[in-house]
Amino acid sequence: MVSLSRRALVTELDRFDRLLEVGCGDRLGVAEDLADRGRDVLAIDVAIDGSSGGDHVAGSTEDADTVPPGSLRVRHGDVVALADAPSPSSALGTSDGVDAVYARRLPAELQRPTVELARRLDAACLFTTLGFEEPVVPVERRSLPDTTLYVAHSAADPFP
């Protein structure tokens, strides 16, 4: 059974076509749900090695004519290094760009680099925290079922 917080987070993120999930670990449920809705998602984590990552095309068991245009790619990536990279888009291999950077259970020490990466990618930045931590960056709080979504505004942020 999918949790209320996961469903609400997917609904909030569904407005973006191209997303980057930071610190995905082995919890790919939100990214998979977004890919199944036709979104292109790149999920990164420092704990993923080259052999465990891969690409998943949403609806890949269906006939090619009925497959929605979504995908999920899982790769090794360090948000701190990416935030400082000369060209984060090139380092990520995202020639089409990213509309939003998001994270689930983002620890305080990774919030600033995540927001900086989103700023450099000209993308919106949204995250949840570990629950007991307050954000250490300026945010707008959005109450969702069973969680709070923090929106760190950036140039491409569609939220008022």
Image (spheres, rainbow, N blue to C red):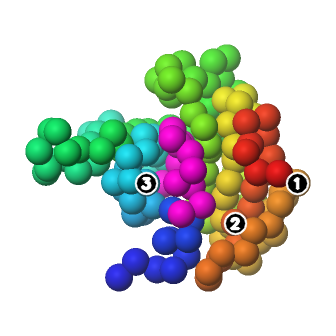
Name which residue lies at 56% across and 71% down. Answer: 8
Looking at numbered disc 3 in the image, what kind of residue is underneath it? Leu
- Residue 31 lies, in percent from the top left, at 43, 54
Name which residue lies at 50% across and 20% down. Answer: 95
The residue lying toward the viewer, choosing from 106 and 101, is: 101
> Which quadrant does the N terminus fall into?
bottom left
Q: Which residue lies furthest to the front in this view?
A: 65
Residue labelled with disc 2: 149
Are discs 1 and 2 less than 8 Å apart at CB?
no
- Residue 102 lies, in percent from the top left, at 61, 51
The residue lying toward the viewer, choosing from 150 and 50, is: 150
Q: Mark 1 vs mark 3: which is more N-terminal? A: 3
Q: Does residue 54 show up magenta in the picture?
A: no
**Quick one: label 1, few (<14), some, or many (20+) residues within 10 Å?**
few
Residue labelled with disc 3: 34
Query: In terms of image quadrants, where is residue 72?
Result: top left
Mark 3–mark 2 distance (CA, rounded to whole Å): 17 Å
User: In the picture provided, is 37 more to the left or to the right than 128?
Assistant: left
Mark 1–mark 2 distance (CA, rounded to whole Å): 13 Å
Residue labelled with disc 1: 138
Are discs 1 and 3 less than 8 Å apart at CB?
no
- Residue 18 lies, in percent from the top left, at 51, 38
User: In the picture provided, is 108 more to the left or to the right than 79?
Assistant: right
Q: Mark 1 vs mark 2: which is more N-terminal? A: 1
Q: Give the range drawn in magenta.
A: 11-26
**Quick one: label 2, few (<14), some, or many (20+) residues within 10 Å?**
many
Name which residue lies at 62% across and 82% down. Answer: 146
